[in-house]
Image (spheres, rainbow, N blue to C red):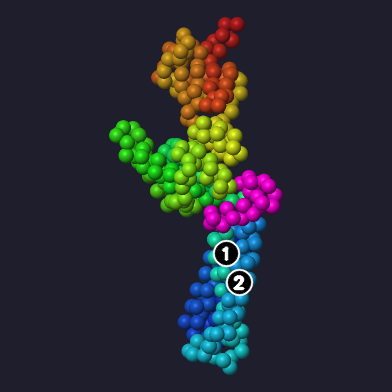
Amino acid sequence: MQIWGVRFVFIIASAVACYLPQTSISTGFVGFAIACILVAGEISLQVTQLRKIVACIIGLALGLIVSLGVYQLLPLSGPFFNPRDELWETISKFLIVIGIGYVGMICAYYISESPNVVRMFNSYRYTQTGTPFATNDANGFKILDTSVIIDGRILEICETQFIDGTLLIPRFVLNELQHIADSADILRKNKGRRGFDILRSLQNSPYIAVEIIEEDVPHLTEVDAKLVHFAQKHFAKILTNDLNLNKVAELQGVKVLNINELANAIRPIVVAGEIIQVHLQKIGKEPNQGVGYLDDGTMVIVEDGKDNIGQTLDVVVTQMLRTSTGQMIFARNSDSIDLEDHVG
């Protein structure tokens, strides 16, 4: 809240400083508008990495040089300028120099985030250090494959703001998605159309930046191989839920963010003896077993639960198994345990 107070005071002070020399509403409005632009640029400027800091310094220096030239060429005469008013001349010079300097800094900041600039920066780092993947965490680029787009959970993850940086979508991924959407199979067609809806929602989301990359990898035919090559070239991570792509990419040194692994990691952990509530939906494979599911999709197998199918029970956890595909919980009906204790 304090920084917002500083920004508000700066805007008002700029408007008043421009209004007083000429007591003109128009000049006051100009000062107000310039101050708002500067504050907006300051808010959008989130410098956290060396590349962005260097780019902003260079942009600011170039902006200051250009502003000095503009000030020398700009005639300080006319309805808004009074050459005999030293105060107004000082204010106008300040606004021109600082304003153009800010514009140069902001432009350099956004240019520094473009994929081509980042690739050049990382390539230079590679020639100097010999570590091609040392900057994977710095550029913030994440490449989406077709499976994770169709899956759809990436949209909700981005809206929670757990993922930052820029999502890169190569043209060959869009082509594969288009091929799925044009399939004669109704299920595949619906999946493809759902994928395009997810992409549209991602582009409209204020929490993530999405960029379509037209670049192709013509010497490779398989989409997975293209994704790995593309990730290596742009020093990016791959977002997927394809286990095979996950393994191939990791073998070639590309970092992978697997949505399924994330889903398993955030599932609640239960311990033996804990009481949970589950709705039994079907009969288990073994005699007298009932099977239900928690809200996150975790399967719960309840011993002696066959007679309670369709009911919601309080069960006691006896064991939990965690696998690469998820976790299973084994439990017993808490009423049967209380009855055994009473009989004992």
Instruction: Name the quadrant of the C terminus.
Output: top right
Instruction: Report which residue position mark 2 lands on.
Output: 62
Q: Range of the magenta residues?
A: 114-137
Q: Amino acid at mark 2?
A: Leu
Magenta segment includes 18: no
Q: Residue at (43%, 43%) from the top-left corner? A: 173
Residue 59 drawn above or below residue 184: below
x then y, percent, for residue 282: 41, 18
Q: Nearer the viewer, residue 125 or 157?
A: 125
Instruction: Report which residue position mark 1 lands on.
Output: 108
Q: Residue at (57%, 82%) from the top-left corner? A: 71
Residue 287 drawn above or below residue 37: above
Circle 2 crowding by C-alpha within 10 Å: few under 14, some 14–19, many from 20: some
Q: Residue furthest top?
A: 344
Q: Residue at (56%, 37%) from the top-left corner? A: 249
Q: Nearer the viewer, residue 86 or 100?
A: 100
